[in-house]
Amino acid sequence: MVIPLSPKKPCSKILYLEPVLVIVPTLEPSAATAGTNPTPDKRSFSAGGGIRPELGGPPLVVANVCNLMQHRAMLFKRLEATKTMRVYIAHNMDDNEELRAKLKSVEDEFTVARKVVDEGVKLLRKTEKRKETAKAESRWLTEE
């Protein structure tokens, strides 16, 4: 029996306690990225011009992005494990005669139960029709 995992279960542990800076900011860009003029432009380093205080600043944003990347990797590993389990179960279901026999017996029981229910519904309808006919006859007799 495979118990499906809840897709909305939040990750309860913090993956990084301290912010991890992936890109170290420098004031001197390399010659490969800057082209022929390696001097930095002072307008691009304005103090706090593009920072949004509600996000907690660059270190917190970087830490959150790193956490999201690890969470994404973990979800992809779970997806891969689920796919592998499905293939394994499908493969073993074909070769397992005991499971096939149980499945066949359950299908037979289900078919029998469905037939019994259908017969019960038919009998109930017949009984209701007879009841309506008897009421109509009793009304007809009382009117005469």
Image (tube, rainbow, N blue to C red):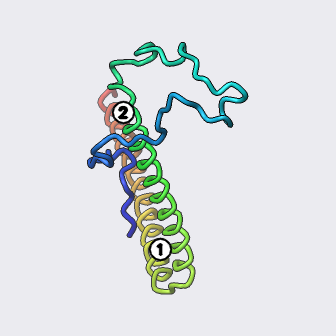
Q: Is residue 110 above or below residue 65?
A: below
Residue lying at 51% horizontally and 61% vertically, measured from the top left: 80
Q: Residue furthest right?
A: 36
As rendered, which of 13 and 51 lies closer to the eye? 51
Marker disc for residue 108: 1
Assign the C terminus to one quadrant of the image: top left
Nearest to viewer (mark 2 / mark 1): 2
As rendered, which of 48 and 131 lies closer to the eye? 48
Q: Is residue 77 above or below residue 129?
A: below
- In the rendered image, residue 92, in percent from the top left (x then y), is placed at 52, 80
- Check disc 1 and give the amino acid type: Asp
- In the rendered image, residue 74, in percent from the top left (x then y), is placed at 43, 54
The residue to which callout 2 is attached is 59
Badge 2 or badge 1: first in the primary sequence? 2
Residue lying at 58% horizontally and 22% vertically, measured from the top left: 40
Q: Cα distance, mark 2 to mark 1?
A: 63 Å
Assign the N terminus to one quadrant of the image: bottom left
- In the rendered image, residue 79, in percent from the top left (x then y), is placed at 49, 57
As rendered, which of 51 and 26 lies closer to the eye? 26
As rendered, which of 14 and 126 lies closer to the eye? 14
Quarter where residue 143 is shown: top left
Residue 125 shows up from this direction: no
Residue lying at 36% horizontally and 25% vertically, measured from the top left: 57
Q: Is residue 74 above or below residue 49?
A: below
Dot 2, how many residues are within 10 Å of its Cα: few (below 14), some (14-19), or many (20+)?
A: some
Quarter where residue 36 is shown: top right
Residue lying at 51% horizontally and 67% vertically, measured from the top left: 86
- Check disc 2 and give the amino acid type: Pro
Quarter where residue 20 is shown: top left
